[in-house]
Image: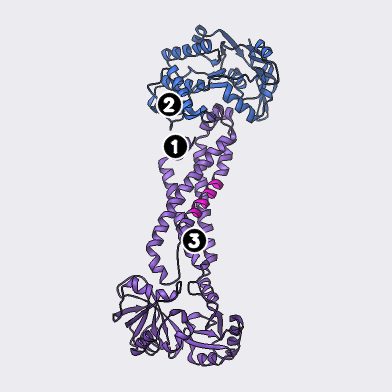
Amino acid sequence: MLKTFNGADGLEESVVRALPYLDMRGVSKSYRLQSEEVVAVRSLNLTAQRGEFIALMGPSGSGKTTLLNMVAGLERPSTGEIRVGGANVAAMSEGEVTRWRRGTVGYVFQFYNLFPILTAYENVELPLLTTRLSGPVREQLVRTALDLVGMSDRLDHRPAQLSGGQQQRVALARAVVADPEILACDEPTGDLDRVTADQVLSMLRLLAKSSGKLVLIATHDPEVRGYVDRVIRIRKGVIE
Amino acid sequence: MIAFVRKNMFRDGLRANVSFVAVMLTFFLYVVIRALSGIVDAPPAAGTDARLMVTNRTSLFGGLPEAHLAVVRQVQDVASATPVSFFIGRPPRGSGQIFGLAVDPETYTAVYQDANIDEDLLARWRAEKRSILVGAELARAKGWRTGDLVTLESLNIVRRDGASDWRFVVAGEFEADSGSIAEQAFLARIDYVTDARLGQGRRYDMLGVRGSGRIGSDGLGERIEKALQFHAPPVRAADEDSFVRGQIEEFGNLRQITFYVLAYALAVLSVVLINGVALSIRSRVKEYATLKTLGYTSRHLIAMVLGETVFLLVGGAAAGAGCALLVLHLAQDTINGMFPFSVNAPLLLIEAVTVGAMVGAAIGLLPAHWASRVSVVETLRSA
């Protein structure tokens, strides 16, 4: 799908191209849990380019999912700045960030989050229903995405009729169907056996390298090292 | 998107079907009541303000003594006056009511010129005490012909011998002016009914009066009431149009009852459906969070939830209204025996669907707001 430049903030395209695609500076995130303040991410700096495949690793509660969510615009930093393709995500309103995410971010969940009443085809079509794309164009995109993950023979299957690995592949197809620039994956292999997990990781790497997407995965899986370009270790909200 | 909304609506088959039936039953009731309340709003078919109806002020069926008739005839600018009693009957072992008027052939035609009874017909009517003249529409509906012997079981007049069966001979048909209620009624002789009925003596349900035209009906009514002010019982003299409307409205304050019953039914339906929709939304919180992650805005989610409730209500309203209109169509003959009645089916259907859409939107508003406020992070963390 052809994408138009939407770097935002009025910067020249050539300038934006020269900058890191993802640029996080002094980002902190804290929650208030009853009367206690919990710091999930502390003064974090991170840059990444398109086409990179990066693993965010660390123990449970280390802040890797929070970091991933902030990149995806699902959470706002308490302090600091997050720029993606030149756009200041942290400064967007809720409606703006939702529209931005629709065109920029594909998200993959650990437990797939497919809709049980919809077929594989319909699940993948969901992100396109809010666009102005025509029915035939949507169909072309959905079939291409499902073909990409090897699920084109399961179009009419519902999630309950698919294995865990197949469901995650459908979820992956749903995440890439709108051709996002960033793929954010939260424990995408956490519920899969080794063989299926390796298939999913291979696909993610392929997506990063063949279509220039920035792929970020939050994971516990040590086998990820064999697929990613970089591993970023996080402990207690700080990059080690 | 519409297909997605439709699938969501029917994802829990039992809940969706029960809700649909509840909506259907409510709108069945809605349309039936609205149609019947239309009787109140509909202009009476036979109504004219050129004719006055004089009735017992206390109760329509309280009756008036024969002496009142003599007084009324003496009132200035009363051109003619005639006694009238109501006869509500049905065929023995049959169904469907038949409406008749017991009247005096000698004076009736002077007051009710729109019945178009000519001299020949009048002569045949005079010839036999039990004879009746039948409105053309009623004759067609019942297949009655001149010379037929007709037996009717009266619902409001008992004979001296304790029986309710009345035998009449059809003396002829009359073609009343179009729209006249007389077209759907028969005319019996009041001397036959009065002489044979139990207990009442020479009393009439009302007096029909035609004025000379030199004074309006309001003024003539006031004169008649004034002339009878020291006679018992007191009377009300109103033009026919006001009289019919007044009687129908007094029939249990139909308009007010209609409003309360409908408001109650819609309130109960709303509470039940809001509960059902709220439960459904709460069970789908994770899905709404996922949709937000996929780029669905709050507006999208509000539209989806409202779409579900509006579709449910519109579909149920249309089905319920359809059933009600069918039942009303089948019962129309029976109802027409009592009141001039007609159903504007397309209008009622549009009204029911419109009300359904509005109630659907109102019911979905709160759950839609909840769905739009779902926190993605909190929901996905707790899932």
Q: Residues within 10 Å of mark 1 (few under 14, many from 20)?
A: some
How far is mark 2 from mark 1, CA to CA?
Answer: 14 Å
- Colour in which the image shows chain B: purple
Identify whether B300 is placed above or below B92.
Answer: above
What is the number of the mark on residue B34? 3
Q: Is residue B117 visible?
A: yes
**Which region is colored magenta?**
B350-363
**As rendered, which of B176 and A30 lies closer to the eye?**
B176
In the image, what residue type sits under mark 3? Arg
Q: Circle 1 — which element?
A: helix
Q: Amino acid at mark 2?
A: Ala
Amino acid type at image mark 1: Lys
Circles 2 and 1 on the same chain: no
Q: Whole-Å distance between the Cαs marked 2 and 3?
A: 47 Å
Does label 1 or label 3 sit earlier along the sequence?
A: 1
Q: Chain of mark 3?
A: B
Disc 1: which residue: B7
Pair 1/3: label in front:
3
Residue B244 lies, in percent from the top left, at 51, 75
